[in-house]
Image (cartoon, grey):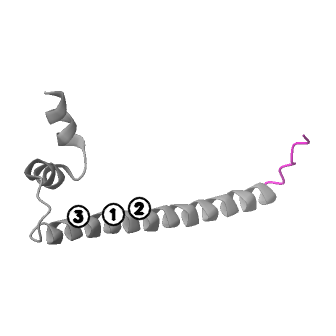
């Protein structure tokens, strides 16, 4: 039961489990292995792209807060 619930929430669930259960290492499994590698690479590229976009937006937010603090003439707190 525990293994089944883990498979439901893991990625890639069905393809990897099928591959492991069959235990195939013949030439017909190589295209499936490459497809999984491509999927993993695409996921990593998507995550990286989203992270870069998030950082860029955060940088714009920091600049906007700085401008607002200058316009409001806030004083910097001495440490």
The Cα atoms of the two marked residues, 1 and 3, are separated by 11 Å
Where residue 72 sits: x, y (%)?
79, 54
Q: Nearer the viewer, residue 8 or 67?
A: 8
The quarter of the rendered structure image containing the N terminus is: top left
**Going by the image, does 40 lie left or right of 15?**
right
Q: Main secondary structure of the magenta part?
A: loop
Q: Which residue is mark 3?
A: 36
Q: How many marks?
A: 3
Span colored in magenta: 72-79
- 2 is higher (above) or lower (below) than 17: above
Q: Which mark is residue 53?
A: none
- Alpha carbons under labels 2 and 1: distance apart: 6 Å
Tag 2: Cα neighbours inside 10 Å, few (<14), some, or many (≥20)?
A: few
- Circles 2 and 1, Cβ within 8 Å, touching? The answer is yes
Q: Is residue 67 left or right of residue 40?
A: right
**What residue do we see at 63% from left, 63% from top?**
59
Q: Position of residue 35 (x, y in %)?
A: 20, 69
Which SS class for mark 3?
helix
Is 78 positioned to the left or the right of 62 in the image? right
Residue that mark 2 sits on: 47
Quadrant in the picture for residue 36: bottom left
Residue located at (50% from left, 66% from top): 53
Q: Tell me which numbered mark, 1 or 3, is placed earlier along the sequence.
A: 3
What residue lies at 44% left-to-right and 68% top-to-bottom?
Answer: 49
Q: Which residue is mark 1?
A: 43
In primary-sequence order, the first of circles 2 and 3 is 3
Choose top left, top right, bottom left or bottom right for residue 57.
Answer: bottom right
**As displayed, is residue 67 above or below residue 3?**
below
């Amino acid at each position: 039961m525990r293994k089944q619930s883990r498979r439901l929430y893991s990625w890639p669930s069905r393809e990897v489990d099928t591959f492991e259960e069959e235990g195939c290492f013949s030439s017909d499994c190589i295209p499936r292995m490459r497809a999984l590698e491509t999927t993993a690479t695409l996921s990593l590229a998507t995550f990286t792209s989203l992270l870069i976009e998030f950082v860029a937006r955060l940088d714009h937010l920091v600049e906007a807060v700085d401008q607002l603090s200058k316009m409001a003439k806030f004083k910097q707190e001495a440490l």
